[in-house]
Image (spheres, grey):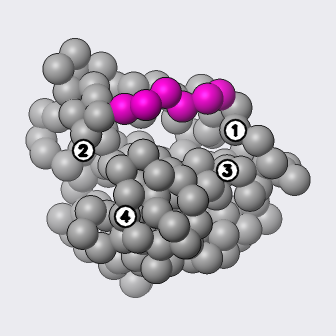
Amino acid sequence: MSGTGDRAVALARGWIGTPYRHQGSAKGAGCDCLGLLRGVWLELYGAEPVAVPPYTADWAEPEGRELLLEAAGRWLVRSAAAAPGDVLLFRMRAGSIAKHLGIAGAVGAAPSFVHAYGGHGVVESALTTPWRRRIVARFQFPEGGA
């Protein structure tokens, strides 16, 4: 695993216990899944690559656009093999757009991922078969950082 992947896992785990807040990105105060990713990005690199506009819970569903997948493709590096620190994108329902993400904590026999989940806040969950089936893509944070 890369040094950036190791660091991303450690930083993501530092957010565990943060309450769920739609559009939030403040460690300890509240975040959603995108806010968790934004917070880890800020800790890794010191600044976000672009400003994230306000979004609703159904933000891209009416258009059917893969906005999260498109943005991940612009700012992250596609991952060929599972590695700790990977950014995982999920489709919550078959045929829907990718709207959830998390950061892989462990791979192998007992895979896990850190994510902000409504009603639970930031948690590290087992990457069970139902979750694995929902993965659309894996990305890595670019090497380097602050």
Q: Which residue is mark 3?
A: 41
Of the numbered discs in the image, which one, if any, rests on residue 91?
2
Looking at this view, is 64 or 118 the one in front? 118
Instruction: Quote the CA–CA distance across marks 3 and 4.
Output: 18 Å
Crowd rating for badge 3 (residues with CA inside 10 Å; few <14, some 14–19, many 20+): many
Front disc: 2 or 3: 3
Of the numbered discs in the image, which one, if any, rests on residue 69?
none
- Do the numbered discs 3 and 1 sit on residues whose CB atoms are within 8 Å? yes
> What residue range appears in magenta?
50-55
Callout 4 amino acid: Tyr
Counting residues from the start of the chain, the first of labels 2 and 1 encountered is 1
Crowd rating for badge 4 (residues with CA inside 10 Å; few <14, some 14–19, many 20+): many
Counting residues from the start of the chain, the first of labels 4 and 1 encountered is 4
Q: Which residue is mark 1?
A: 48
Residue 110 position within the rendered picture, expressed as x and y whole percent measured from the top left? 40, 83
8 falls in the magenta region: no
Callout 3 amino acid: Trp
